[in-house]
Amino acid sequence: MKNVFSCIHKTATGLNGVAAGIIFILMILTAANVLLRKLTGISITGMTEISELMMIILVFFALAQAEIMNRHVSVSLLTDRLTSGARKYLAVITSLANALFYALITAAAIVYGFSLRSAGDVSMDLQIPKYPFAYVIACGAAVLSFVFFKKTLASIKDEKSL
């Protein structure tokens, strides 16, 4: 079981690296678009589409690593006042609910990807197929679901999460 979660951790780190590369490319494209507009008065065709599609990759590939590093927003106003046993119980319930929620998102994104592919849905200007981005959502949500499942098991065993 430890090898499976080690693989998930490496996958999350790799996906986060891809997300970092995407944000760098997005920065270069945005700067080039702004410069091109200022200097020549024309802009890169489909830049809005490119940005939107790249943001899907960026967000969903970075989610699991952010959870591993405990970088997501949390509100501890109420949980700080609970006993340690109640906090542990709440952590198990919350992590399990999140794992199941993101597993459902994964399944829904896969089904949606199949429907986009069969419909031949493409973006407006650049005619980029949309279905691969539904699979990106599914991939990111699946890895995040496994991370939450690991946190659930860690909370049950009373270990430090990831």
Image (spheres, rainbow, N blue to C red):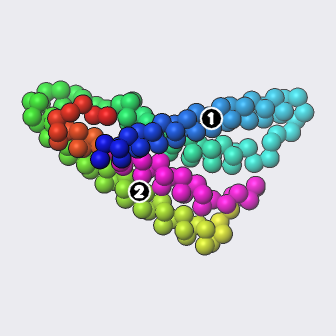
Give the class, few, some or many, for how many residues have Cα within 10 Å of label 1's Cα (few <14, many ≥20): few
Q: Give the secondary structure at mark 2.
A: helix
Q: Residue furthest front?
A: 3
Q: Is residue 63 visible?
A: no
**Viewer-proximal residue among 30 and 117:** 117
Tag shown at residue 79? none
Q: Is residue 149 left or right of residue 48?
A: left
Picture coordinates of residue 13, whole percent (x, y): 48, 36
Nearer to us of marks 2 and 1 is 1
Which residues are drawn in magenta? Answer: 123-148
Q: Is residue 98 left or right of residue 137?
A: left
Q: Is residue 77 left or right of residue 125?
A: left
Look at the magenta stretch and give its main secondary structure. Answer: helix
Task: Say which quadrant the C terminus sits in.
Answer: top left
Residue occupying the point 13% across, 27% down: 81
Which residue position is annotated with label 1? 21
Which residue position is annotated with label 2? 105
Q: Eyeballing the image, is 121 above or below 35?
A: below
Residue occupying the point 73% across, 44% down: 47
Amino acid beneath label 2: Ile
Residue 90 included in the magenta stretch of the image: no
Give the class, few, some or many, for how many residues have Cα within 10 Å of label 2's Cα (few <14, many ≥20): some
Q: Is residue 83 visible?
A: yes
Q: Quadrant of residue 21?
A: top right
Amino acid beneath label 1: Gly
Residue occupying the point 11% across, 30% down: 84
Picture coordinates of residue 117, whole percent (x, y): 61, 68
Picture coordinates of residue 132, whole percent (x, y): 60, 57
